[in-house]
Image (cartoon, grey):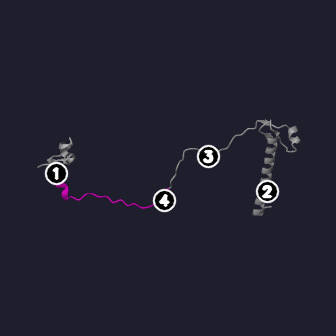
Amino acid sequence: MDFRGPYDHAARPVRWRSPFFPLGCNDAGTEAASRGAGQPVPVEALVIAPRAQMLTTDLPGRIAPLRVAEVRARWLASSRSVTSLKVRWSKKVICCSPSSPLHCRRWAQSRQRRAQAQVKQAESLCIATNRW
């Protein structure tokens, strides 16, 4: 008795499923294979040695590492308002908003603190290098 299950068709030979099977089967291929069996196969030797290689990666985005903001003042404080703030400068103070004198005063104070910090930094540099 011959019992066949539902998946017995999978055990059939592949040659019946492939339409290209008859194209590859001929006697000329077996003759060529038997003729070349005794000859050595040409082989090339390739030597791989480690060496230093410079890797550069171009990242998309900014060209410069820092961006410089171009900020322009909206108005110049008059010398009268500068003297009322008790700030004495040889040049006019640049403020950002004419409606807030408190902002101008804070801006002037921050500029003064920055200048004082730069003076201290220069003094410490001169002391460290003995060029005082």
Secondary element type, mark 4 = loop
Secondary element type, mark 2 = helix
Which region is colored magenta?
29-53
> Which is more N-terminal, label 4 or label 1?
1
Picture coordinates of residue 7 (x, y %)?
22, 47
**Which residue is denoted by mark 2 in the rendering?**
120
Secondary element type, mark 3 = loop
Magenta span has 34?
yes
Secondary element type, mark 1 = helix
**Residue type highlighted by circle 3:** Ala
How far separated are the C-alphas under marks 1 and 2?
Answer: 93 Å
Q: Main secondary structure of the magenta part?
A: loop
Picture coordinates of residue 67 (x, y %)?
65, 44
Front-most of residues 127 and 114: 114
Picture coordinates of residue 21 (x, y %)?
19, 44
> Which is more N-terminal, label 3 or label 1?
1
Mark 1 vs 4: CB contact within 8 A = no
